[in-house]
Image (cartoon, rainbow, N blue to C red):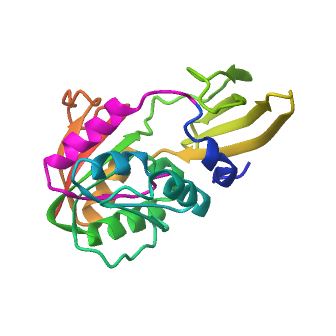
Amino acid sequence: MDGLGNYAMHARFLDWGGVDRTPEFEYWYGYALKYGKRVLIPMCALGEAGAYMAQRDMEVIAFDLTPEMIDEGKKRFGAVDGLTLLVGDVCDFRFDIPPADFAYCTDFGHLHTTDDLKRALGCIAAHLRSGGGLVVETALRTASDRSYETEERRFEPKKQVYPGLKVWKTGRDREDAETGRHYISQTFYTEDESGDVRSFRHEFYLQSYTYGEWRGAFDESGFDVAAEYAARDLATWQSGSEGFRIFELVRR
């Protein structure tokens, strides 16, 4: 299985689910306001959240490794003032921009080694002002994790969003507790009005890290942990709890 997935083909259909993401975008906009109006969004995909913030008077630099994602983002949001979309590798980027006030990332599971994780955090730190904020959302790897595998399932969008085109997915996933890897294997389907069905594969895995690995990476990369949360309603975790974690970090 490819560790990165077929995001080049997926770019056009990233919003296939027909879900209104306004509450999510509003959440990140409100979080950014806590730190300032210059926002950096690594691994941004199409840059939808960045466009939402830029339309609300923020200066946003959003970037992604996949050029097709950025091309599609520019088609949709290229006219939005205050939004800059760039191609860049989160583990090795250097942009000539003013230091950002705030950054966030929910996709660090796509980084498959702790060295990559530290490189990414170091690059982000280099683009944040002193005292700037970074929020990381992640699943933690814990001793209680268990391996499992699901059966093949079909996934339908909440509503069909592409005129003249019906879309759906099939897929299965597998958790390997020994390695901390979560494997996802999908096939994406499109059917046009003439009944022509096309498909492509999208396979990748996400790597989870332990609480100690995350804390060590933050410290080495120049971040202090300001707070930890259980969910986006900001219910506080006790330090060291298992499961999903939101880290709110401040650059030293």
**Residue at point 65%, 37% (across, down):** 184
User: Residue 104: x percent and y percent?
Assistant: 32, 51
Rendered-image quadrant of the C terminus: bottom left
**Residue at point 23%, 73% (across, down):** 98
Magenta-drawn stretch contains 29: yes
- Compared to 51, does 90 lie above or below? below
User: Residue 239: x percent and y percent?
Assistant: 21, 37
Q: 19 left or right of 40?
A: right
Q: Nearer the viewer, residue 65 or 83?
A: 83
Q: 21 left or right of 7?
A: left
Q: Quadrant of residue 93?
A: bottom left
**Residue at point 60%, 30% (across, down):** 147
Magenta-tinted stretch:
17-45
Can you see residue 112?
A: no
User: Residue 182: x percent and y percent?
Assistant: 59, 39
**Residue at point 29%, 53% (across, down):** 54
Magenta-drawn stretch contains 88: no
- Compared to 120, does 7 lie above or below? above
Q: Nearer the viewer, residue 168 or 111?
A: 168
Can you see residue 25?
A: yes
Q: Quadrant of residue 202?
A: top right
User: Residue 103: x percent and y percent?
Assistant: 29, 55
Q: 145 left or right of 98?
A: right
